[in-house]
Image (tube, rainbow, N blue to C red):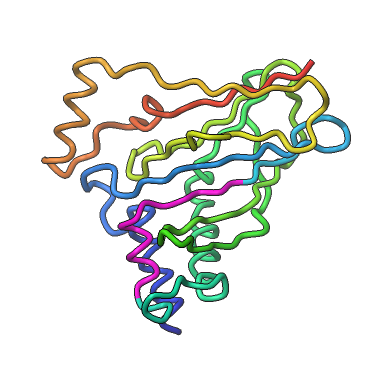
Amino acid sequence: MTRAVVRACAAAALWFGLAGAAQAHPHVFVTASEELLFGPDGQVSGVRHAWTFDDMYSAFITQGLAAPGQVATREQLAPLAKTNVQSLAEFAYFTIVKAAGKGSDFGEPTDAWSEESADRRVTLHFTLPLKAPASAARALTLTVYDPTYFVAFTLAEHDPVALVGAPSGCSASVYKPKALDPGETRALNESFFTNLSPGADFGAKLAEKAVVACP
């Protein structure tokens, strides 16, 4: 097993919490830019993700890959991108798409690759096709989150959700989660000191939701 593959496996273990799912949360922070892909029939056919990791996780996964002062290349990051995307299947890709309240199933992800920017942050790109096209005529929702809150997802401040190939008149709005109540805030704060999860599906309470509507 090459050093790159070993590093990819270790990084995936850290990202997905395989080294200890009961540890304090979150451990990895992700800024997500999303694209909803529309087919010729005007229905949503897939989601294209671009997830940028925090500086600490990015530094861990790129350590020793490139020459000092250089950013890691797409080729050097390829084993990590492949391992991460393969591992995502166990977690339903942290992605929920619902059309008229009905959830969508996903096919095998495609076009997986990673890049490191000049500010030394790594972004994972991949496309997640829907097994069956979904209509946005009665409001379609996209949510990206980790139920355990091991990974904290936040939608990008600028252009968080783009509609690619959408029919004229379609729009996307992002809704912030409501504030935690005192008990939930206490559970979250205690999780950082007790090394216990703040609760089952706690990530849903902090998840942002994109709502897409087409005429």
Q: Residue furthest bottom?
A: 2
Please tell me which residue is depicted at 50% across the width and 20% down the height of the picture.
175
Query: Residue 195's x, y, as percent?
Result: 16, 44
Q: Is residue 88 above or below residue 201?
A: below
Answer above or below: position of 186 versus 90.
Answer: above
Q: Residue furthest right?
A: 40
The part of the image, by quadrant, that contains residue 173 is top right
Residue 1 painted magenta: no
Task: Report the residue at 47% width, 46% height from top.
Answer: 91
Start and end of the magenta stretch?
Answer: 49-63
- Residue 111, percent from left and from top: 67, 59
**88 in relation to 172, above or below:** below
Label tally = 0
User: Based on the displayed image, in which of its 4 quarters is residue 132 positioned?
Assistant: top right
Which quadrant of the rendered structure holds the N terminus? Answer: bottom left
In front of the other: 202 or 64: 64
